[in-house]
Image (cartoon, helix red, strand yellow):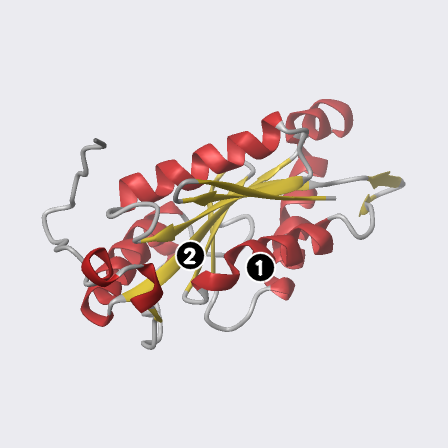
């Protein structure tokens, strides 16, 4: 039987007794974090420090409301090749355009973070459609080449997603499950998404 680890502040959500079908969508607005320490200077979106604050807040609130939260982790496919082929300035430009396309694909209550390098996360209260959200972003990213000076750089991304509390009861376990789904998408050939599912995974590809 799998051992479950809980953060000190997390109690068992009612869904562990009544089942995942008892979950609701989170109905409280995400807090707004101010201060440069919460923002990535290159892309202008929330950074890892902000992610840590938001996921902790979100899971506490989800316990109180018996709500679900979706976590998605995105990774730019073969990003190292962009830097090696076109240079780091081109890599920075790609990261900025990637962020712009991601942000344009998200809705008001979906929170975008850059954790570092080419790794990004999205938090969403619309947990039943977490795979569809990832697909919306993936298609927007790959719809046209990224332009940098005279070059047209084809870019795709892969993603993995997981749902609290179905796939993990604390921030560490939830992230681990989404990250494993991401690596499964990469093992499957990239430019696709994989959703962690209790009892299995779901895959969505090009």
Identify the residue at horizontal 82%, vertical 50% (top origin): 144
Relative depth, front residue between 159 and 22: 22
Instruction: Find residue 89 and report its image quarter.
Output: top right
**From the image, which quarter does the C terminus lie in?**
top right
Residue 193 in the image: state x and y as whole percent.
60, 43
Identify the residue at horizontal 35%, vertical 65% (top origin): 21
Q: Which mark is residue 70?
A: 2
Relative depth, front residue between 64 and 153: 64
SS for tag 1?
helix
SS for tag 2?
strand
Q: Residues within 10 Å of mark 2 (few under 14, many from 20)?
A: many
- Left/right placement of residue 2 relative to residue 79 reads left
Relative depth, front residue between 2 and 62: 2
Identify the residue at horizontal 55%, vertical 70% (top origin): 107
Tell which circle, 1 or 2, labels the residue nearer the N-terminal end: 2
Residue 41 in the image: state x and y as whole percent.
49, 50
Q: Which residue is mark 1?
A: 133
Task: Kindly check if marks 1 and 2 are in contact, taking CB atoms under 8 A apart as contact.
Answer: yes
Residue 20 in the image: state x and y as whole percent.
32, 59
Q: CA distance from mark 1 to mark 2?
A: 10 Å
Relative depth, front residue between 180 and 46: 180
Q: Is residue 34 visible?
A: no
Q: Which mark is residue 93?
A: none
- Left/right placement of residue 123 relative to residue 100 reads left
Pick out the residue farthest to the right: 150
């Amino acid at each position: 039987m799998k051992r479950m680890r809980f953060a000190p502040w997390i109690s068992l959500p009612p869904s562990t007794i009544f089942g995942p079908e008892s979950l609701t969508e989170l109905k409280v607005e995400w807090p707004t974090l101010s201060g440069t320490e919460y923002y990535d200077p290159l892309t202008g979106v929330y950074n890892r420090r902000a992610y840590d604050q938001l996921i902790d807040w979100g899971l506490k609130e989800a316990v109180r409301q018996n709500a679900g939260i979706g976590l998605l982790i995105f990774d730019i496919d073969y990003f190292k090749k962009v830097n090696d082929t076109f240079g780091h300035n081109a890599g920075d430009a790609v990261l900025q355009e990637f962020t712009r396309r991601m942000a344009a694909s998200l809705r008001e209550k979906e929170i975008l973070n850059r954790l570092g390098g080419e790794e990004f996360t999205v938090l969403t209260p619309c947990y039943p459609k977490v795979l569809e959200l990832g697909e919306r972003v993936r298609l927007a990213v790959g719809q046209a080449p990224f332009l940098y000076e005279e070059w047209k750089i084809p870019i795709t991304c892969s993603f993995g997603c997981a749902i609290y509390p179905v796939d993990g009861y604390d921030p560490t376990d939830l992230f681990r499950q989404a990250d494993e789904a991401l690596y499964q998408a990469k093992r499957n050939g990239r430019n696709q998404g994989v959703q962690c599912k209790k009892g299995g995974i779901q895959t969505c590809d090009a």
